[in-house]
Amino acid sequence: MAEDQKTDPVMSPEDVADDTPAGAPDLPQGTPAPAMTAEDLSQAQFQIQKIYAKDVSFEVPNSPAIFSEQGQADVKMSLSQRVEGLGDDLHEVALTVTITATLDEQTAYLAEVSQCGVFLMKGFPEQALHAVVNTMCPTTLFPYARSAISDLVINGGFPSVTLQPVNFEQLYAQRVQEMAAQQGNGAGGNGAGQDTPATPQF
């Protein structure tokens, strides 16, 4: 097999899903998260309480025959996030990174890491808190998940995989803009437009 494997360099908003249940604030429809003022920053607290791997899996469904295949594997990365309020301004954020590698239309391997963190987020305005949950938290967790994925792939008998950086702030801002545009189109129609989620997905 080839020595170098790379993930796709560009992640679109559709590749990242935010599953934010009650306990994390929703962003009002059509309202982008504003920049925080100096007063907001002086009152806000963001602290990492704990970072841990909650679930790790690695599968090689076509072994050992797959190790005889030649060529460079096509590696795809998908992301999802779950947020759970724990009370006392604490939130558990779980970022799941899933890697699927295919070679000659066969699955070479599947690697998945659910990287979690418990974060103290206190004193943020509601809209700013939603943005922090969807940007700062996954940005903090992603390097840990990337390292774990790399170890899984190497220990699984495959060449190392290079996960491209993910700009969660850009994805989140793009998703907010898309939702605002969709809501604007719906408001300008005949009233029969479909409802859109209140919580933007990155």
Image: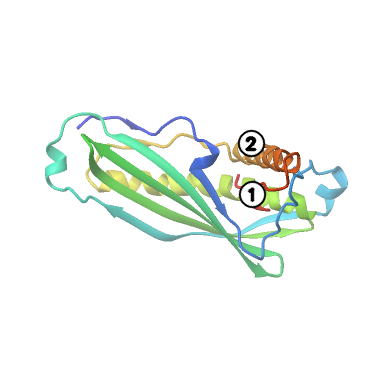
Residue 144 percent coordinates (x, y): 47, 48
Q: Is residue 104 above or below residue 85?
A: above
Q: Name the residue furthest right.
A: 39
Q: Which mark is residue 194?
A: 1
Mark before the other along the chain sequence, 1 or 2: 2
**Residue situated in front as seen by the camera: 188 or 120:** 188
Secondary structure beneath label 1: loop
Badges 1 and 2: C-beta atoms under 8 Å apart? no
Q: Which quadrant holds the N terminus?
A: top left
- The residue depicted at 22 percent of the width and 44 percent of the height is 157
Q: Nearer the viewer, residue 160 or 189?
A: 189
x, y percent for residue 168: 59, 40
Q: Amino acid at mark 2?
A: Gln
Q: Quadrant of the C terminus?
A: top right
Colour treatment of the image: rainbow
Secondary structure at numbered mark 2: helix
Residue at the spot x=79%, y=58% of the render? Answer: 123
Mark 1, other Cα within 10 Å: few <14 / some 14–19 / many ≥20: few
Which quarter of the picture shows residue 178?
top right
Residue 25 location in percent, x, y?
Answer: 71, 58
Instruction: Say which mark, if any, is on residue 142.
Output: none
Viewer-side label of 1, 2: 1
Disc 2 target residue: 174
Between marks 1 and 2, how big is the CA–CA gap? Answer: 20 Å
Residue type (three-letter) at the residue carrying disc 1: Gln
Q: Nearer the viewer, residue 142 or 30?
A: 30
Q: Position of residue 137 (x, y in %)?
A: 60, 50
